[in-house]
Image (cartoon, rainbow, N blue to C red):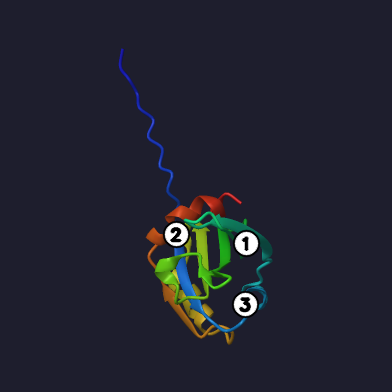
């Protein structure tokens, strides 16, 4: 009798961008709603640090059911403590999860850069977000 093994890939494919701006997160969400016709909803992500202190980070989520994409605008700071220490220079992150193969990331980044609320945008490596991906994408 032969054995079959089931191999499950539990990684998500997503694009990540770092945003530098001086606006509040809800204001940036409003700009994104206007530009892309998003319908962001606000949530909170509670993360504990090494000392056990819980910090609450706000994030906004929009589901694009037609293109099978989820957009997340994540605030990187809670009481001046960064959510992702490797990217502490960014105020917020924009994460796009779903059918990334069909997603035009260059055009999306160009539109983000043209927003008056955003001063600087940079495409980021996904590795620092690995610990967050399950908390965010399963929401």
Residue on which the image places disc 1: 61
Instruction: Tell me, yes or no, if residue 100 can be seen here.
Output: yes
Q: Position of residue 4 (x, y in %)?
A: 35, 24
Instruction: Tell me, yes or no, if residue 68 can be seen here.
Output: no
Q: Residue at x 45, y 51 (%)?
A: 12
Q: Position of residue 135 (x, y in %)?
A: 55, 52
Which residue is at the front of the view, 30 or 21?
21
In terms of sequence position, does the residue under pointer 1 or pointer 2 come before the other?
A: 1
* In contact (CB < 8 Å): disc 1 and disc 2: no
Residue on which the image places disc 3: 28
Q: Is residue 109 left or right of residue 57?
A: left
Quadrant housing the N terminus: top left
The answer to which image quadrant residue 129 occupies is bottom left
Q: Is residue 53 left or right of residue 86?
A: right
Residue on which the image places disc 2: 129
SS for tag 2? helix
């Amino acid at each position: 009798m032969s054995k079959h093994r089931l191999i499950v890939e539990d990684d998500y494919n997503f694009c990540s961008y770092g945003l530098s701006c001086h606006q509040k997160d809800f204001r940036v969400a409003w700009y994104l709603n206007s530009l892309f016709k998003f319908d962001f909803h606000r949530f909170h992500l509670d993360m504990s640090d090494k000392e056990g202190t819980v910090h609450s980070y706000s994030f906004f989520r929009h589901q694009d059911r037609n293109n099978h994409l989820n957009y997340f605008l994540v605030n990187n700071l809670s009481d001046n403590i960064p959510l992702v220490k490797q990217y502490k220079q960014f105020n917020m992150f924009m994460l796009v999860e779903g059918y990334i193969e069909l997603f035009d990331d260059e055009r999306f980044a160009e539109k983000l850069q043209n927003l008056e609320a955003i001063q600087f945008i940079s495409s980021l490596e996904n590795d620092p977000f690995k610990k967050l991906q399950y908390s965010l994408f399963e929401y």
